[in-house]
Image (tube, rainbow, N blue to C red):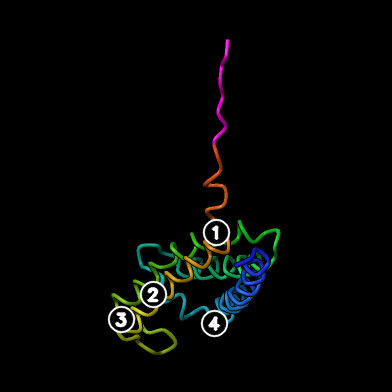
Amino acid sequence: MSNLVLHRIRIVLAIALGIPFIMIGVEHFLRPAPFDAIVPVYLGFPRFWTLASGITEVLLGIGIMLPPCRRLAALCLAVFLMCVYPANLNMWLNDIPFNGHVLSHKAHLLRLFIQLLLICLALWLADWRKGSTRKAAVITNED
């Protein structure tokens, strides 16, 4: 695939990922109770974590849609998705309803798969391997 095609695919996927993250982030402020309920007890202060993750989702959603910010925002999004998974795991292990519904075992497995897919997509959007194949400078001392 040409670089131009890959570039266009990245733009479309960044927008397709950014918009839902912004919407879900805003939802943390409009209806925080369902998000509060899944915050693991050991973290304490569920409303703080709900609002902090909401603003983070909004900012990262905007960031991945803006080309100058995309690489850093996408890397941060991958880390963020790993950091918030304990809330999903808490919901799974403790059968905590979300929006009045307890998810089935299959639904939680699907959610885990989607989370892993989103992490991979964020890393691809960040072009995280860029630079990892750069040749190291060789310093020689010829005296």
- Nearest-to-viewer mark from 3 and 4: 3
Q: Does dot 1 land on a helix, a strand or a loop? A: helix
Distance CA(mark 1)–CA(mark 2): 19 Å
Distance CA(mark 3)–CA(mark 1): 29 Å
The amino acid at mark 2 is Phe
In the image, the segment drawn in magenta is 136-143
**Disc 4, disc 1: CB below 8 Å?**
no
**Mark positioned earlier in the residue sequence (3 or 1):** 1
Q: Pointer 3: residues within 10 angstroms few (<14), some, or many (20+)? A: some
**Residue at position x 41%, y 90% from top?**
100
Q: Does dot 4 land on a helix, a strand or a loop? A: loop
Q: Residue furthest front?
A: 1
Distance CA(mark 3)–CA(mark 4): 20 Å
Q: Does dot 3 land on a helix, a strand or a loop? A: loop
Q: Answer left or right for 64 relative to 112.
A: right
Q: Which residue is mark 1?
A: 76
**Mark positioned earlier in the residue sequence (2 or 4):** 4
Q: Which residue is mark 4?
A: 31
Quarter of image, res 21: bottom right
Q: Which residue is mark 2?
A: 113
Q: Answer left or right for 118 relative to 11.
A: left
- Nearest-to-viewer mark from 3 and 2: 2
